[in-house]
Image: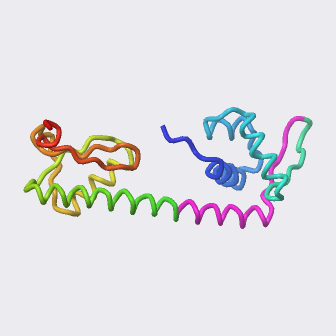
Amino acid sequence: MNYPSNVERDLIILEHIEQNPDTSQAALASQLEVAVGTVNWHLKRLIEKGYVKVSRLERKKLKYIITPEGLLFRARLTVDYIQNSFNLYRLVRQRAINALDEVKALGYHSVQVRGNDEVAEICRLTCLEQGITIVDDGAAPLLKMVGLKVILETKEKSNK
């Protein structure tokens, strides 16, 4: 499972507050799948930095308001997140292309792709783009994902 970084959590919290200022820390914790104390820590940081203000609605009910600085911060986090995602996509895609170039050089026209995560999906799309057929045949080379790495395994290599 991929857990969000602190920056991603800040972004999710800011987006959630923007959509629902009356949200609770428990609701934010549930959405982030973290403890309420973790959300509390993030909110305190965001408040200290001037990105979020808090007002009391009732004795135990708070309202969170994103400041103009918080809106700018959220926009910057969003742009950074998108740029980072595209950079990771390009990195994995290039690694898949390199592996597929090796597949072609070995004379193969099809591969197996193992995995159900985003990296495997990028590999599948790259195979389609490169004219390589994806098969479920043990004789075909295997593209195996390990983190962000794309590893090519062929029968020749695995027998050595």
Residue 149 image position (x, y, % from top left): 36, 49
Residue 71 image position (x, y, % from top left): 73, 64
Point 52% across, 61% down: residue: 84
Magenta region includes residue 61: yes
Residue 36 image position (x, y, % from top left): 73, 34
Q: How many marks?
A: 0
Decide if residue 108 is on the left or right side of residue 31. Answer: left
Q: Nearer the viewer, residue 57 or 126?
A: 126
Q: Quadrant of residue 97?
A: bottom left
Point 16% across, 57% down: residue: 132
Decide if residue 138 is on the left or right side of residue 55. Answer: left
Decide if residue 131 is on the left or right side of residue 71. Answer: left
Residue 22 image position (x, y, % from top left): 77, 46
Decide if residue 102 is on the left or right side of residue 30. Answer: left
The vertical placement of 33 against 63, above or below, is: above
Range drawn in magenta: 60-82
Q: Nearer the viewer, residue 137 or 158?
A: 158
Point 36% across, 43% down: residue: 146
Q: Nearer the viewer, residue 57 or 84?
A: 84
Point 28% across, 47% down: residue: 151
Q: Main secondary structure of the magenta part?
A: helix
Q: Residue furthest front?
A: 160
The vertical placement of 109 against 42, above or below, is: below
